[in-house]
Image (cartoon, rainbow, N blue to C red):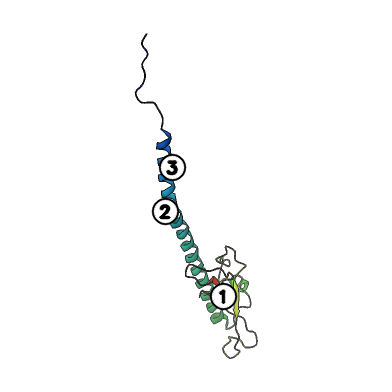
Amino acid sequence: MRFTTKAHPRGFTLIEMIIVMSIVLVLLAIALPMYNQAILRSKEATFKKNLFTLNEVVQRYSEDKRQAPQQLDDLVQAGYLKAIPNDITGVNTTWQTEQETDPEKAWNPDQMGISGVVSGSNEPGSDGRPYSEWR
């Protein structure tokens, strides 16, 4: 009977496992901030589009009706929007409306309404300004 021993045992050594895990962790440390930044840019792009759309629809409504909307829901009820889009916060209830203030510039001085919309979030955006200051 002959006993043979294998020259190369199966599996990885502890050193090999540590090296592989270190490489994976370094790659994750590089990729994760880029991923988070890409997600933020995507959210901000959607927010900018929603903000632009809302303000544009407020103006169209005002021009068509010769009267500014009294609330954002008026835009949905009149068929200008299917639904109020989400703010940067992820919900559509945080939008802040800017009211017409000058009766001479208002569409209907007897019934002044919304002149524009801004975000209800004061968190800073990627440019350092709060979202509520974005136009």
List the residue tagged with mark 2.
30
Name the foreground residue: 24 vs 66: 24
Q: Nearer the viewer, mark 1 or mark 3?
A: 3
Name the foreground residue: 69 vs 13: 13
Residue found at x 65% / y 87% = 110
Residues at marks 1 and 2 touching, judged by CB atoms closer than 8 Å: no
What amino acid is at disc 1?
Val
As drawn, which residue projects farthest toward the right?
A: 110
Label of residue 21 in the image: 3
Q: Quadrant of residue 80?
A: bottom right
Q: Quadrant of residue 61?
A: bottom right
Left or right: where does residue 76 sit relative to residue 20? right
Residue 94 at x, y = what percent? 61, 68
Q: Earlier along the polypeptide chain: callout 1 or callout 2?
A: 2
List the residue tagged with mark 1.
117
**Label 1, label 2: how far apart the Cα atoms are:** 38 Å
What amino acid is at disc 3?
Met
Up the image or down, 22 lies above or below 10; here it is below
Residue found at x 63% / y 84% = 112
Alpha-carbon neighbours of circle 1 within 10 Å: few (<14), some, or many (≥20)? many
**Label 2, label 3: how far apart the Cα atoms are:** 14 Å
| Numbered disc 2: secondary structure | helix
Q: Quadrant of residue 54?
A: bottom right
Name the foreground residue: 123 vs 118: 123
What amino acid is at disc 2?
Ile
Q: Earlier along the polypeptide chain: callout 1 or callout 3?
A: 3
